[in-house]
Image (cartoon, rainbow, N blue to C red):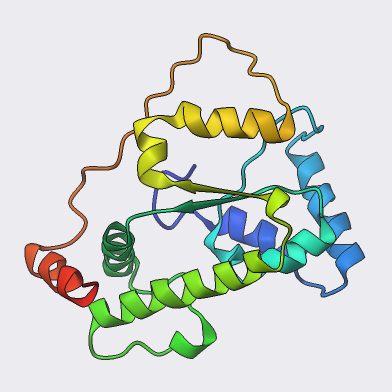
Amino acid sequence: HTKNLSDTNEANEMVNFWFKTSKIKEIRKRFYETMEYFNYDRTNLLIIKNISLYDKIYNLHKAVPEILFLHISRNKRAVVESVVKSHNDLGYFNFPPKELKCIGPNLIDHSVNYIQSIEKTILYQLNKINDQNIIYFSYEKFCKNPYDLIKILKHKISFALKNKNLKLKVRQSNRKKVSREEKVQIKKILK
């Protein structure tokens, strides 16, 4: 969890630490060193969500084959709006694909290409991994009923919730992400 959009440095540094080497055994060692830092002892469920992993999924799987990947897909229009807002707030894109380092004249077009390129890379990497190591789920479905994903996770990795009376309330953010004009442009491009 980060309070501000620019508070992602700690997670990014963690991922960068794992992949400062290309040696699979060393990546595994570094991964578990990080897990020790978080007091992870295989009885805790730890979910790592970090965009900088999108092009390293397969190598992470090779290094830690017991890891389970959650592919949470979201309405493309909402994702593009979020990326445009993020760019407007920060002034840059987080971890752009190599072919998209230079921003074209249209931020919306560039944001759509950015999302499509990352999504293509993620799917390519996931296709190289055994389906038993992947859970595909919809963000919108998760927001409606997070317990559906929890049931799948419990079945896949056999964990027990310590708080049986846990009440999860998840909702999609209703904050304004982009201007009305940007919203219309995004809708046209994604048709």
Q: Farthest residue to the front: give it.
A: 131
| Residue shown at 81% from the left, 55% from the top | 64
Q: Nearer the viewer, residue 184 or 174?
A: 184
Number of numbered callouts drawn? 0
Q: Is residue 93 above or below residue 34?
A: below
Pick the front one: 93 or 61: 61
Splitting the image into 4 quarters, where does residue 23 fall? bottom right
Residue depicted at x 28% and y 57% = 78
Q: Position of residue 43 (x, y in %)?
A: 77, 27
Residue 127 screen position, x and y as percent: 65, 67
- Residue reaching furthest to the top: 165
Residue at figure coordinates x 23%, y 85% from the top left: 106
Residue 170 vertical placement versus 6 (above, below)? above
Taking the image as shown, residue 141 lies to the left or right of residue 80, namely: right
Residue 155 image position (x, y, % from top left): 67, 30
In screen coordinates, is 62 left or right of 170? Answer: right
Instruction: Return the x and y of residue 92 as percentages of the image width and height.
Output: 38, 74
Where 141 sits versus 182, above or below?
Answer: above
The image quadrant of residue 50 is bottom right
Residue 133 visible in image: yes
Apparent side of residue 95 relative to residue 20 in the rendered image (left or right): left
10 in relation to 139, above or below: below
Residue beneath the point at 21% across and 72% down: 191
